[in-house]
Amino acid sequence: MEKETARLEAFSDGIFGVAITLLALDIKIPESVEAADDVLWRSIVQLWPAYLTFFNSFAVVLLIWMGHHMIFREVRKADTRLIFLNGLMLLLIALFPYPTRTIGQFAGTGAEAVATAFYAAYTGLVSLSFLLLTLRLRATPALLVSGAGARAALGQLARFEAIGVALYAMLALAALWWPGLALAGTCAMWLYWGLVVALGGRQGAITSGEAA
């Protein structure tokens, strides 16, 4: 069957690319810093929260983009509801630099707990939007390239995504008492999503083979 989602996928890829670019724009030395070697070096080191959250958010966006690419291999066409849900996910991705900037600014300060909770909760919201997209596809076989095999793979992916959303909710709650531990937990989620993407890619390959 001919795929009809090329424009939707190209638009989505553009949003992902812009979001990743925007993540790096706030990593800069303040203009007020004195032009002296020791002061500049200290300023570079003091930006460690911005470095950490940039790499953390970059990994999250990259893995979501990989997951998006993975599931859209199984999509033949899009209906209005799917386009809307995809747009909701892209909206949250485009805004991701905001919570990233917030945690980068307030990590290690008296507002670290709220900043970390906000960051973890927002990342969970992004994951929830991806879960809704997956569930829509699973519930609408007419949109898929292959039928039963693709629905089974999407069902497995949805279960992993639901677990991920729950984990982010737990991290957001834990951040109010242990912000450092919760921030480390958001970084550890790379491993979880990397495993999900790897398993999903393997399942997708099997499904494609069955459809052929």
Image (tube, rainbow, N blue to C red):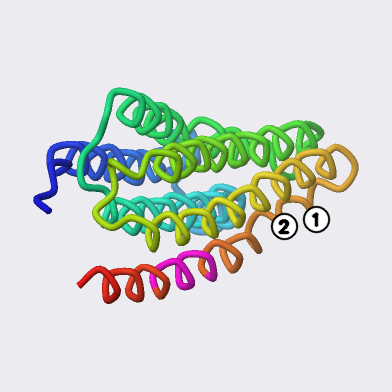
Q: Residues within 10 Å of mark 1 (few under 14, many from 20)?
A: some
Residue occupying the point 37% across, 58% down? 150
Residue occupying the point 35% across, 28% down? 87
The amino acid at mark 1 is Leu
In the figure, is residue 145 to the left or right of 186?
left
Quadrant hosting residue 94? top left
Residue occupying the point 46% across, 65% down? 197
Q: Residues within 10 Å of mark 2 (few under 14, many from 20)?
A: some
Q: Is residue 64 above or below residue 120?
A: below
Q: Secondary structure at mark 1?
A: helix
Name the residue that disc number 1 marks. Answer: 181
The amino acid at mark 2 is Gly
Callouts 1 and 2 close, C-beta under 8 Å: yes
User: Distance of mark 1 from mark 2, alpha carbons?
Assistant: 6 Å
Q: Main secondary structure of the magenta part?
A: helix
Q: For this rendering, which residue is in front, 151 or 106?
A: 151
Quadrant hosting residue 140? top left
Image quarter of the C terminus: bottom left
Name the residue that disc number 2 marks. Answer: 185
Q: How far across and how far down the image is residue 191, in percent? A: 59, 68
Q: For this rendering, which residue is in front, 13 or 152?
A: 152
Q: How far across and how far down the image is residue 107, in percent? A: 70, 43
Which residue is situated farthest in the left direction here? 2
Q: Secondary structure at mark 2?
A: helix
Q: Which residues lie in the magenta part?
A: 195-201
